[in-house]
Image: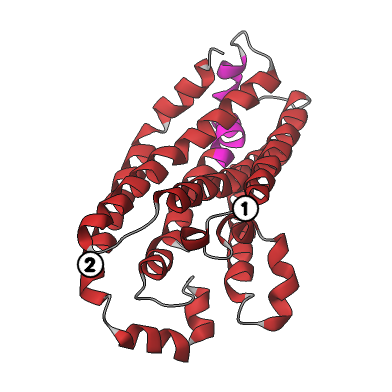
Amino acid sequence: MDLTITRLDLRLRRRAMIGYALGLAVYSLVIVVLYPSFKDDTGLDQLAKSNSALMAAFGVSGSLTSPAGWLNANLFNNFVPLIAIVLTVGYGAWCLAGQDEAGTLALTATLPVTRVRMVLDKAVALLLQALPAIVLTFGCVLVGRAFELPVDIGPLAWTSVAVLLLAVDFGALALLLGAVSGSRGLAVSVASAVAAAAYLISSLAPVISWLGPAEYLSPFYWALGNDPVTNGIPGWRLVALLAAAMVLVAGAGAVYRRSDIH
């Protein structure tokens, strides 16, 4: 598999990819290093209990001073997926609709590959957009073992995979929306709105009873529900996230194959 288009797109997006990855790594290290200063602060847990709905909106649930609770509240329930989704949605909206608007997609289409293959190459690039940020975060969290922040490698690894697939899902949605509409702005705005709604549903469902049934519709629940840093993640959830991405990419390929290029 040549992946020429993947390499071309990654070269064009390398600054954002590297910049976000390094920024997230620095942030993750800061969170890890700060944990010993807060692990015995009972006031944090009291604050979380007294404002459960507000805390849930920020991805905070359970104890803030336990190792898993600290990582969830400061990384995996909010900031890490946010950065990964920003990367993938931005690329997904740009790689077809954005390039078409800029008039550069026609040049890419002159390469000796089919349109479906072009979309598949761009889907690989979409995955690789967020991969460095996730890998660096994983490595920085492991450093926490030197800062009284023990964490099991297995659940942490699968949580990282789940966050990556979550970001790919929303990036693939932006890819499909861009293929259908031809508008980068529309693809970004709609995919971002869907991601925000899915996040709020998953975060607030545990504390707002009438939202409970809706959490099963949220990819955030599939990826991050039931504290995967502590409990691991069922295989069916990872399969569901991967299947959703594959369906969205297949839809983008089917639409793009029949579209006009400017």
Up the image or down, 72 lies above or below 16; here it is below
Quarter holding the N terminus is top right
Alpha carbon distance from label 2 to label 1: 30 Å
What type is the residue that disc 1 sits on? Pro
Marked residue nearer the N-terminal end (2 or 1): 2
Residue 214 position, x and y percent, is 73, 69
What type is the residue that disc 2 sits on? Leu
Question: Label 1: few (<14), some or many (≥20) within 10 Å?
Answer: few
Q: Which residue is identified by label 2?
A: 34
Residue 45 location, quadrant: bottom left
Please give the name of the residue rendered at 68% of the width and 67% of the height, measured from the top-left corner: 215
- Disc number at residue 167? none
Magenta range: 92-109
Residue 84 in view: yes
Up the image or down, 119 lies above or below 149; here it is above
- Seen from the viewer's position, the closer of residues 2 and 237 is 237
Left/right of residue 21 with respect to residue 101 in the rendered view: left
Up the image or down, 134 lies above or below 59; here it is above
**SS at circle 2:** helix
Identify the main secondary structure in magenta. helix
